Image (spheres, rainbow, N blue to C red):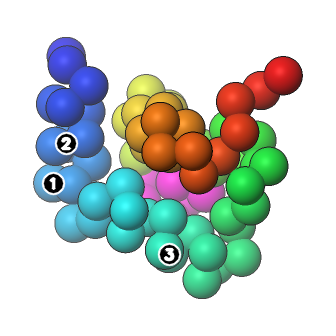
Amino acid sequence: MSFQAYLDTIKAKTGKTPEQLKDLAVKAGVYAADMKAAALVSWLKSEFELGHGHAMAVWAYWKSKGWVSAPK
């Protein structure tokens, strides 16, 4: 499955883009620039019933935009 296919499936399942998911995470108090991937994954699983791979695709997208820091 391509990365774009992951994003398309996320949009189909949640009705949200990664940008919209970020906005919702901010509103929910979950988002922080220094957050860990596990916090995002847990939230996406509980709120949107995304699987681990799809939640990690959101994380990767956010990392690519500089919205979260890569682990050091």
- The label number, if any, that marks residue 45 in the structure image: none
Q: Is residue 60 above or below residue 29?
A: above
Image quarter of the N terminus: top left
Closer to the chain start, of discs 1 and 3, is 1
Give me the C-alpha separation between circle 1 and circle 3.
Answer: 17 Å
What residue does disc 1 label? 12
Look at the numbered discs 3 and 2 and tell me whether their residues touch, using CB distance below 8 Å. Answer: no
Give me the C-alpha separation between circle 2 and circle 1.
Answer: 5 Å
Residue 2 figure quarter: top left
Tell me the chief SS of the magenta region. Answer: helix
Q: Is residue 51 magenta?
A: no
- Amino acid type, callout 1: Ala
Which portion, as a residue range, is magenta?
42-49
Residue 41 screen position, x and y as percent: 59, 44
> What residue lies at 70% left-to-right and 30% top-to-bottom?
70
Give me the C-alpha separation between circle 3 and circle 2.
Answer: 18 Å
> Is disc 3 surrounded by few (<14), some (14 to 19) or many (20+) residues within 10 Å?
some
Look at the numbered discs 2 and 1 and tell me whether their residues touch, using CB distance below 8 Å. Answer: yes
What residue does disc 3 label? 24
What residue does disc 2 label? 9
- Amino acid type, callout 2: Thr
> What residue lies at 77% left-to-right and 26% top-to-bottom?
71
Closer to the chain start, of discs 3 and 2, is 2
Taking the image as shown, residue 37 lies to the left or right of residue 2, namely right
